[in-house]
Amino acid sequence: MKQQDNNSHTTTTRLLDNEPVGRTVQVVRVMGDGAFRQRLLEMGFVRGAQVTVLKNAPLQDPVEYMIMGSHISLRHSEAAQVEVTDKDAEFCDLEDAFNGIVETEVAGMDPMADNVLRVVLVGNPNCGKTSLFNNATGAREKVGNYGGVTVDSKEGWFNIDGHKVQLVDLPGTYSLTEYSPEEMYVRTYIRDNRPDAILNIVDAGNLERNLYLTTQLMDMNIPMVVALNMWDELEKSGDKLDIDMMGRLLGARMIPLTAYNGHGVKEVLQATMQAIEESEQETLHHNVNYGTLIEDCLKELGAMCPGMDRYTVLKIIENDQHAIDLLNGQDNAQEVKETAAEMRQRIERDYNSDIVSIITDLKYGFVRGALAEALTPNPERATGDTKPGYSMDRLLTNRWLALPILLVLMWLMFEATFTLGAYPQEWIESGIGKIGEWISHAMPDGILRDLIVDGIIGGVGGVLVFLPQILILFFFISLLEDSGYMARAAFIVDRIMHRVGLHGKSFIPYLIGFGCGVPAIMATRTLENRRDRIVTILTVPFMSCSARLPAYLLLVAAFFTAKQGLILMSIYLIGILVAALTAILLSKTILKHDKTQFVMELPPYRKPTARNAVIHMWSKGKQYLQKMATIILAASIIVWALGYFPRHEGQTPQEQIENSFMGKMGKAIEPVVEPLGFNWQMGVSVLTGAAAKEIVVSTMGVLYTGESDATEESASLKEKLQTATKPNGEHVFDPIVAYSFMLFILLYFPCIAALAAIRREAGTKWMLFEIVYTTGVAWLISFIFYQVARMI
Ligand code: GDP
Ligand code: MG
């Protein structure tokens, strides 16, 4: 391939895809168009940037590259979009784009106009925003070494010099281009809330890429402070940064910070307050100087759009649809659009390139120019797998070991959850049993006693015993997130996920889904592609969440004597299989889309902190307890009451249940569940289990023993199930019925909380689809299994 560049050199170019592992090359250009190309440019794939091919994933796709000091995963098909040339080919002068800064005047602001001082935290994913936020406000938000852990904004307060200031932790973003949901969120937040200051957190060890976002923030004309976080790592690396010079070149206040231990937090907050104070007077703003041609355009167009910040004006010239939409309602909208189009043509002609690359190149040129002056890299600094923070990759993403290690880690996680959790579970169980006994003796016979003992203690207690397991599972998930392994897991399994039409990133929500579907559905926010997100959201409930476990444990213990572990695992595997088939089906039909492309960053490994894991565990535990105190408490009382009333004198407990409201309900739905091998008691259990899957067991407890303090351990319930007989004398349960029942519990109706999350993230339409689809699939699979198993 030959390419003519603007300096009229002729450069021989190749495709990045064909470069062997270990080679370093130079980017010439990114082909194609649209959002993916823009993302690549923003991640640093600009003219003249050096890329090193680090390694193929164990399944050969994707490939790990290093660019601007960060590790990025690209599929072969994506790397084929990048044209490269030899590392030392001379075709592009890196610093020639550095024009320094320009100063623009803006009117003073009144920070107290809305009675609150508001500061927003903006920065790349994983640069330490949440760590700073927690440190400054005393909050205990989740930090994590994985992009997209913060998907909402979190608000907190800090006090300084007698002022009370609101601090907002925004999701991590590489840019403000409004291409991913996070970018959109951050951009909209800043536009709508007009914070009094921006606190831009950058990773000091990765300035080139991090400062790109800074160049965009500078153009928003809001007072800004740049916090150079991970200062400890920069010092350790031996690189030298002249902060004063850097600050002068960029025209920004720069303060070193080590957020996770709190060094520099005070200085950063003070500098922010100072920036706010200064903004009260008429002030000069520092912006990237894009060179005479573009600066003239910005001035001219800016004058036509009073009230718009420089960022938006530039975006209009770039033909950005979101920015252009903001013109609606402005009298001269048409005129502005035409002028912008003319300017765009003029600029593109002059630079002999397309506008998006030109602006990105100029921004990166600005950053590089400043860094060339102010940063002295340690010449002995290691790179690649030998770089500190990446050495574990030699093992963990090793071609042969990666998949086995991933499987062992997952197995360890589940095994530890269940075996370690069993001890505290027993204590809680016997504690609850004692309380129930004590109340039974202490209280006189009557409805109130039955309600407390059978309804509340039985129902809620039966579910409370799983708290230890839940805590342990989330402890492990937190460790995986915090250490940086989650991104590797996505890297390793991308090829497999690709088969079902998804990206490796979907793996994380699935993994979290084994704990609980609600945070898993929230975690899909890291997926840029909306269709991908919806496919993931709709299939996450097939990952068997921990709430379903009590029912399996009960049934496996009662009806399978050998290979109990394997039986249990087969249920989980069937869930995964159904999810995979559903994903294929959806992405081939109603959610059909082009193959999803996105660049994923592999952050350096970091030591997970115990504090963090405990915070995470605690917040999950709190949520679980809240669920106990609300949904499950209410449901237990309702289930109990439906089985308790109407009362008739002189009935056996069995007759009482049969003639109760619950019994009548069960009889009504019996025909629907009969072909699956279920009787009416099981039908009622799955019905009530729709509120929360744990309730399946507590309902069985009410229906089979006449008292609901049943858990999977409770011998009486287990025995009752084993000996329960139909009117004709046959056993109600046998292994086939039990398995069919487990399949149904696995697949049907996600609980109310999960549906609420689906509705919030994907909309009502998809929530309704999910209800029908999951229940339909559950019925069909249980039906086929039961009928076929009966025949053979
Ligand atoms: P966010 O994604 O920007 O909110 O970043 P987090 O606050 O979640 O932090 C990302 C990771 O960087 C976590 O593993 C933190 O423990 C770690 N971290 C944060 N600040 C520092 C720091 O100053 N130095 C070092 N070495 N690590 C940090
Ligand atoms: Mg965060």
Image: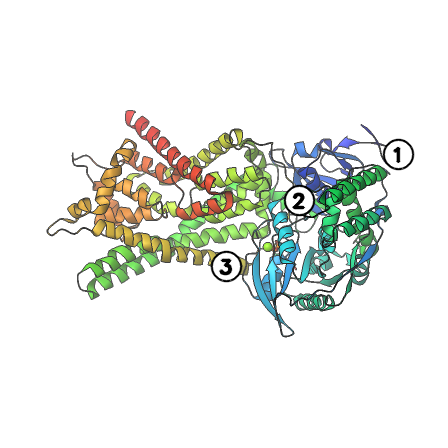
Rounded to the nearest whole Å, what is the CA distance between mark 1 and mark 3?
Answer: 59 Å
Amino acid type, label 2 = Asp
**Is residue 256 in sight in this rendering?**
yes
Which residue is identified by label 2?
325
Estimate the x, y position of residue 284 in percent, counting from the top left: 79, 62
Residue at position x 80%, y 39% in the image: 342
**Is residue 462 in sight in this rendering?**
no
Rounded to the nearest whole Å, what is the CA distance between mark 2 and mark 1?
Answer: 40 Å
What element does badge 2 sit on? Answer: helix
| Residue at the limit of the structure toward the top, as seen here | 791
| Residue at the limit of the structure toward the front, as seen here | 331
Q: Is residue 682 above or below residue 272?
A: above
Estimate the x, y position of residue 438 in percent, counting from the top left: 24, 64
| Residue at the limit of the structure toward the right, as seen here | 8
Residue 614 image label:
3
Amino acid type, label 3 = Val
Please tell me whether mark 2 or mark 1 is closer to you in this view.
2
Estimate the x, y position of residue 260 in percent, counting from the top left: 62, 61
